[in-house]
Image (tube, helix red, strand yellow):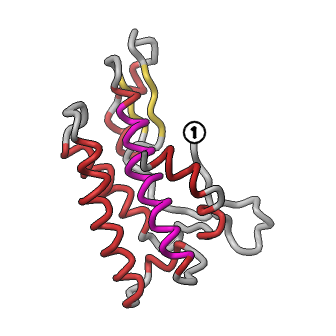
Amino acid sequence: VDRITSQRPGSNGLVPRCEPIPNKCLVVEDLHADLPNKFYEDDMKRKFGFVIRTKPNQLSTDIDLKLRVANGTHTAVAHVMSISSILQTTALSSSSSISSLVLQYLDSFFEQQILQAATTTGRIEKDSVQDVYADWRRRLTHSTFGLSTFFITQNGAAKGGIRIG
């Protein structure tokens, strides 16, 4: 589970800020149908982002998409933001010209680099990659989602190699 969150001001780090629930908040592999039927109901996915994978390699695809699309684009945009003296990723929720420019860069980076690399082997469908990016971009531009660009860019060379590949 990778849920690094920012915290509400004045909470001494104890209360996280709210953000939209991701489409895939928790992905569980259940190859032998061991989970109770309740977990398979549509409400679990719709309300909580709970997704069950029932076939081999589905979970590894989800991991690849999370690393490449969400973490990869986050790492890239955080570096651009930090060298532009934008200290918090919450700036992406504003309608300023610099935020628009950064989001244009992010969309281009996704289209030209991430999407191309993710679909070259044919193992991952283009629509799946685009769906993950649309969900991630929705969260990234939400006013209560945000982290320090300094925090994200720490150890950037190692993170970039793992995430962007």
Q: Is residue 100 magenta?
A: no
Residue indicated by mark 1 = 1
Q: Position of residue 16 (x, y in %)?
A: 65, 60
Q: Would you say residue 123 is visible in this rendering?
A: yes
- Nearer to me, 92 or 35: 92
Q: Is residue 70 magenta?
A: yes
Q: Within the image, what quadrant is residue 49 found in?
A: top left
User: Does residue 163 appear left or right of residue 158 in this picture?
Assistant: left
Q: Which residues are magenta?
A: 61-82
| 149 over 114 or under it: above or below | below
Quadrant showing the N terminus: top right
Q: Residue at x 36, y 63 (%)?
A: 137
Q: Residue at x 38, y 86 (%)?
A: 95
| 3 over 148 or under it: above or below | above
Q: Position of residue 67 (x, y in %)?
A: 45, 44
Q: Would you say residue 48 is visible in this rendering?
A: no
Q: Counting other residues with Cα less than 10 Å from the Cα at mark 1, is it few (<14), some (14-19), or many (20 or more)? A: few
Q: Within the image, what quadrant is residue 9 found in?
A: bottom right
Q: Residue at x 19, y 46 (%)?
A: 127
Q: Extreme bottom residue here?
A: 97
Q: Extreme right residue here?
A: 12
Quadrant showing the C terminus: top left
Q: Within the image, what quadrant is residue 62 found in?
A: top left
Q: Position of residue 29 (x, y in %)?
A: 43, 22
| 137 over 72 or under it: above or below | below
